Image: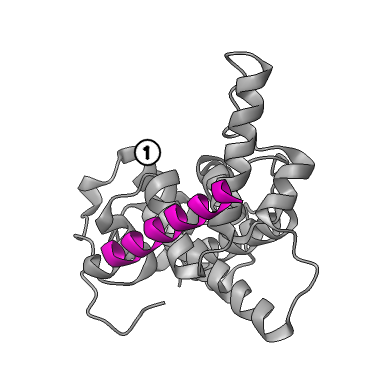
Amino acid sequence: PTRSVQDRPVRGAPELAIVQGDTGVADGAFVKQAPALSWPDIADREAGMISRCVAGDDEACTSLVADHQRMVSQLGFHLLGDYEDARDLTQDVFLQVFRTLDRFRGQSALRTWIYRIAVNQARNRQRWWRRRRRADQVSLEEHIEQHGEQALADHSGGPDRALNRQQLATRVWKALDELPFDQRTAIVLREIDGLSYDEIAYSLGIAIGTVKSRLTRAREALRTRLREVRAE
């Protein structure tokens, strides 16, 4: 009989290279599931790649990682605020992807399914930190000061405008870093990663109404914090 993916060693998940500077649980509420997708609804290349990964094809596994690694590493950095932790998270996410890929049935897009895994992994890390009162976490603001924010960098318009944009980016990331994890996750998935409400609801395992309320609270908290910073 054919062995499942769990019965085989995880293959196609080599050490993941994240470029430094690169920069996604349920509440007990009713969850509106994202519409189920049939295999014909999924792109032929993606469906074929999934089947080959489940069969243990190294090349297909490498392709899956290449297609989604940047997305996961950016989400990890935006949620955790630390380069090393984002790299570790990315490793854990893809290990989980390959362990459970044989159970993927097209209940969402593959990308959204991977987002859900990444968010849950990040949430677990947050809980681990709170239990141990981790003191050496590098905040988003400190990381930006050390490495810059390449994803938002725009040097057009001269050095003064570039400096102003960098200062604004630092304030925004600091305000984002101070949000509760659930609010930060919702705002990152919506405003940075561009997910729809349905995709966010599936990724977080919550109702669409809860997504909207979290986004409302997160946006108001960001506006309040940025007003306070300008007044300082």
The reply, left or right, for residue 35 in relation to residue 108 is left
Residue nearer the viewer, 140 or 104: 140
Q: In this picture, is 205 found above or below 158?
A: below
Q: In this picture, is 59 found above or below 179?
A: above
In the image, residue 137 lies at what x, y percent? Answer: 75, 65
Q: Residue at x 40, y 50 (%)?
A: 111
Task: Name the image quarter holding the N terminus.
Answer: bottom left
* Quadrant in the rendering for residue 113: bottom left
Q: Residue at x 51, y 68 (%)?
A: 181
In the image, residue 105 lies at what x, y percent? Answer: 31, 63
Residue nearer the viewer, 127 or 32: 127
In the image, residue 83 lies at what x, y percent? Answer: 71, 52
**Looking at the picture, which amino acid does disc 1 mark?**
Arg
Residue identified by numbered label 1? 45
Magenta highlight range: 211-232
Q: Residue at x 63, y 24 (%)?
A: 162
* Quadrant in the rendering for residue 161: top right
Callout 1 secondary element: helix
Q: Using the rendered image of the protein, determine whether residue 10 is visible from the camera's viewpoint.
A: yes
